[in-house]
Image (spheres, grey):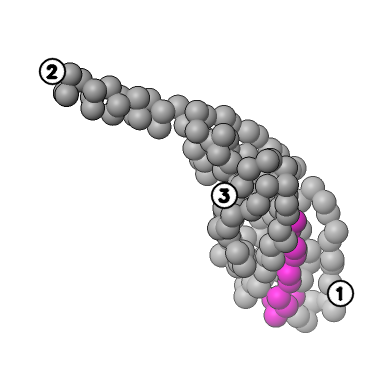
Amino acid sequence: MKRVILPVVVIIIIAIAIVMSPFYVPPSDYVKNVTTYQKKGPFYMLLVYRYPVKANVTDVGERANIGVSTDKDRINFGSVSKTLVVRKFLVIKNYENKTADVSLYIYGNVSAYAEIMENHFKLAPLSNKTVELKFNATDIGYYTGELDVVMRVRR
């Protein structure tokens, strides 16, 4: 009888721990400003940084000016012609004393033309990494969405 009870108890404990663990849920609507949230579970902590993303793509013949953005509270690829590739760099910092598993996700109509050069990696404790983002639209239009940086840190 004891041989049956112990495995059942272990399975129940593991199931409860999994249910109690925080997990990342993709956004149903996109943020207007940088937003962060944190969830703690029994085995790890989840930190999510949500950045609004936008770009305005115009025809080469419309006007020869390019709008460059240095916004710190959003990822704005600016106003660009459809033949131009725009690069942005995002510095991701791990403020924790343990290694973080980092994943980046992009959503919205901007995601069809945006590329994250490295979207899954480990980040050492108290360190940072610069990630390159590229935007290359082939169609004229106004593009919006959200970039989520998800950090999972063991407790």
Look at mark 1 in the image and give the residue it sits on. 65
Mark 1 and 3 residues: CB-CB less than 8 Å, in contact?
A: no
Task: Single out the residue that lies furthest toward the left.
Answer: 1
Q: Nearer the viewer, residue 149 or 79?
A: 149
Q: Nearer the viewer, mark 3 or mark 2?
A: 2
The answer to which image quadrant residue 91 occupies is bottom right
Q: Amino acid at mark 2?
A: Met
Tally the marks: 3
Residue at the spot 64% in from the left edge and 72% down from the top edge: 137
* Structural distance between the alpha carbons of marks 1 and 3: 40 Å
Q: Position of residue 3 (x, y in %)?
A: 16, 24
Q: Which mark is residue 1?
A: 2
The answer to which image quadrant residue 45 occupies is top right
Q: Nearer the viewer, residue 147 or 41?
A: 41
- Residue 13's place in the image compared with 76, above or below, is above
Q: Position of residue 37 (x, y in %)?
A: 65, 34
Mark 3 crowdedness (10 Å alpha carbons): few <14, some 14-19, many ≥20: some
Residue at the spot 73% in from the left edge and 52% down from the top edge: 127
Residue 122 colored in magenta in the image: no
Q: Is residue 73 visible?
A: yes
Residue at the spot 17% in from the left edge and 19% down from the top edge: 2
- Residue 44's place in the image compared with 69, above or below, is above
Task: Single out the residue that lies furthest toward the front.
Answer: 2
Q: Position of 112 compared to 134: left or right? A: left
What SS does tag 3 mark? strand
Q: Amino acid at mark 3?
A: Asp
Q: Position of residue 13 (x, y in %)?
A: 35, 25
Q: Position of 64 compared to 49: left or right? A: right
Q: Amino acid at mark 1?
A: Asn
Residue at the spot 56% in from the left edge and 65% down from the top edge: 112
Look at mark 3 in the image and give the residue it sits on. 101
Which portion, as a residue range, is magenta?
81-91
